[in-house]
Amino acid sequence: MRIAVVVALTATVAGCVSSPVQYGASLSPQDPKWATPECQQARTDAMNYDAREKGQPGWGFGVLLGPYSMGLVAAAKEHQQQQRRLLARQVHLQCSSLPLPKDLDFDPQIYAPKPAKYP
């Protein structure tokens, strides 16, 4: 029962952030920043990430490894969500003159690796 709740909750959370490629396609090509090399690079990075993400094993892989691997799969999905948010934010900053939308207006340092503290 507990595993089913974790799987359902994580699947719901993982679906919240749209693909950076889809987000970039939703921006206006008439924006002056759209044709800049920085925007083209950001869109290329988003497409490359999207292709890599689709090639990674998903929930089925975790089920094959057993119930203890579900936490590992959930952590990987959380990391993917964070990466999608960062890439969508970068695409917006490079390709749009509009202010950041509320869901992308965050400090990117919150996803930066934390320094390890060992005793």
Image (spheres, rainbow, N blue to C red):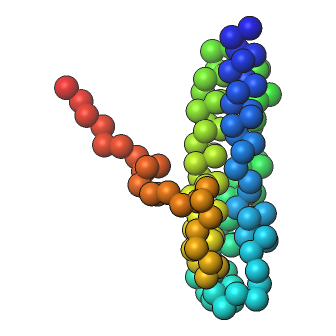
Q: Tell me if I can see residue 38 in this picture.
A: yes
Name the outermost residue toward the left. Answer: 119
Image: 60 above or below 44 = above
Residue 105 pos. (x, y %): 54, 61
In the foreground, 62 or 35? 35
What is the tally of numbered marks visible in this picture?
0
User: 60 left or right of 110?
Assistant: right
Residue 8 pos. (x, y %): 75, 25
Task: Identify the residue at image location x=78%, y=63%.
Answer: 22
In the foreground, 4 or 58? 4
Q: Quarter of the image holding residue 116? A: top left
Q: Quarter of the image holding residue 109? A: bottom left
Quarter in which the C terminus is drawn = top left
User: 59 left or right of 92?
Assistant: right
Quarter in which the N terminus is drawn = top right
In the foreground, 1 or 40? 1
Task: Identify the residue at image location x=58%, y=42%.
Answer: 79
Task: Identify the residue at image location x=65%, y=38%.
Answer: 77
Name the outermost residue toward the top. Answer: 1
Residue 101 pos. (x, y %): 62, 64
Q: Tell me if I can see residue 48 in this picture.
A: no
Task: Identify the residue at image location x=68%, y=21%.
Answer: 6
